Image: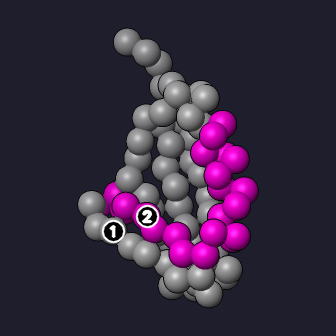
Amino acid sequence: MFEIQLVVINEFGEFLGRKAVISEEDYKNLLVMARSFYQNGNFDLTCEDGSFIVFPPEIVQKSILKIIKKSINNV
């Protein structure tokens, strides 16, 4: 299992997504989806503070999507 966090970085700042725990298979699927980040137009993100943000296509085109991954131990 992995703890992941999406981070969107652009001219308006750094937007931290809510952390989630996902399986290795889900992580691989997330990477596939991330590859089409610029092609999908809008992008929405639930932030770590619980707020929700939608980036319009012109901001997505000027943004960087970062995925932070941390391995966690199953207890």
Q: Is residue 50 left or right of residue 56?
A: left
Query: Which disc, if any, is residue 2?
Result: none
Residue 37 within the magenta-colored segment of the rendering:
yes
Residue 28 visible in the current orientation: yes
Q: Which residue is mark 2?
A: 45
Q: Is residue 3 magenta-colored?
A: no
In terms of sequence position, does the residue under pointer 2 or pointer 1 come before the other?
2
SS category of the residue bearing label 2: strand
**Residue at the disc numbered 1:** 52
> Where 42 falls versus 30 (above or below)?
below
- Residue stretch rendered in magenta on the structure: 28-49
* Mark 1 closeness class: few <14, some 14–19, many ≥20 residues within 10 Å: few
**Relative to 26, is 34 on the left or the right?**
right
For the question of whether residue 64 can be seen, the reply is: no
**Percent position (x, y) of residue 8?**
55, 67
Q: Which structural element holds mark 1?
A: strand
Mark 2 vs 1: CB contact within 8 A: yes
The residue drawn where x is 63% and y is 40% is 29
11 lies left or right of 74: right
Q: In the image, what residue occupies the spot 70% across and 70% down?
A: 39
Q: Residue furthest front?
A: 40
The number of numbered badges drawn on the structure is: 2
Name the residue located 33 percent from the left edge and 68 percent from the top edge: 52
* Rendered-image quadrant of the C terminus: top left
